[in-house]
Image (cartoon, rainbow, N blue to C red):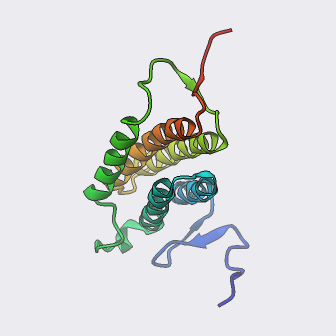
């Protein structure tokens, strides 16, 4: 199979199921931003020293493939079957990881700036790309597309996870969070 098909040269691409759409349509913006997030996570993994963090981030990348596949499928072509939907358990897993990470970082008392260690800075990049993905998915829903509420819940929790992970990665590195101060 060739990687290039030449079918997108005129600004159109196919959704799962074969429907042709503009490469600038909101559905593509949604799953394209999820794809971008997945790539940033790949970089973040290379900076994480703790095996548990790397393993959890890999599970997030796998879950994002489910999210991306869901978003890349036209509503009329969507089949609900195990492995191609976001589940309540996926949302709960993120919440449990947030709780576990919050237990090992100091209480948050001030606004913090992205930074500190390289890993923490990358976690903040993931957080902001995740927030953009959430906005794109909400725009898709507002345009009339059906979007399962578990998808938006998952992406919303995921951005919170990256915030707490950034703080934990700084703590692991023995670096304090960068506190915002008004100059």
- Compared across the picture, whether 53 is left or right of 151 comes to right
- Compared across the picture, whether 146 is left or right of 178 comes to left
Residue farthest along the bottom direction in this orientation: 1
Residue 145 lies in what quarter of the image?
bottom left
Percent coordinates x, y for residue 79 in the rendering: 32, 74
- Nearest to the observer: residue 21 or residue 113: 113
At 60% from the left and 56% from the top, the residue drawn is 36
Residue farthest along the left direction in this orientation: 88
Image quarter hosting the C terminus: top right
Is 7 placed above or below 126 here? below
At 42% from the left and 49% from the top, the residue drawn is 155
Is 109 placed above or below 82 here? above
Number of numbered discs overlaid on the protein picture: 0
- Compared across the picture, whether 120 is left or right of 54 comes to right
Is 86 placed above or below 165 here? below
Percent coordinates x, y for residue 141 in the rendering: 40, 50
Percent coordinates x, y for residue 161 in the rendering: 44, 43
Residue 42 lies in what quarter of the image?
bottom right
At 72% from the left and 80% from the top, the residue drawn is 6
Percent coordinates x, y for residue 174 in the rendering: 58, 34
Residue farthest along the top direction in this orientation: 183
- Nearest to the observer: residue 173 or residue 9: 173
- Nearest to the observer: residue 149 or residue 7: 149
At 63% from the left and 39% from the top, the residue drawn is 121
Image quarter hosting the N terminus: bottom right
């Amino acid at each position: 199979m060739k990687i290039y098909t030449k079918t997108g040269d005129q600004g159109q691409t196919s959704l799962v199921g074969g429907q042709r759409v503009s490469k600038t349509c909101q559905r593509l913006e949604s799953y394209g931003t999820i794809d971008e997030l997945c790539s940033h996570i790949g970089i973040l993994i290379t900076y994480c020293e703790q095996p548990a963090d790397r393993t959890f981030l890999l599970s997030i990348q796998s879950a994002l493939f489910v999210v991306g596949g869901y978003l890349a499928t036209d509503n009329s072509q969507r089949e609900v079957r195990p492995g191609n939907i976001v589940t309540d358990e996926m949302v709960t897993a993120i919440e449990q990881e947030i709780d576990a990470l919050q237990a090992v970082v100091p209480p948050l008392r001030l606004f913090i700036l992205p930074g500190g260690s390289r890993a923490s800075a990358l976690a903040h990049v993931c957080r902001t790309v995740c927030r953009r993905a959430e906005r794109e998915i909400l725009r898709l829903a507002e345009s009339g597309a059906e979007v399962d509420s578990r998808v938006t819940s998952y992406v919303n929790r995921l951005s919170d996870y990256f915030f707490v992970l950034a703080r934990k990665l700084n703590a692991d590195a023995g670096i304090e969070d960068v506190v915002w101060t008004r100059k």
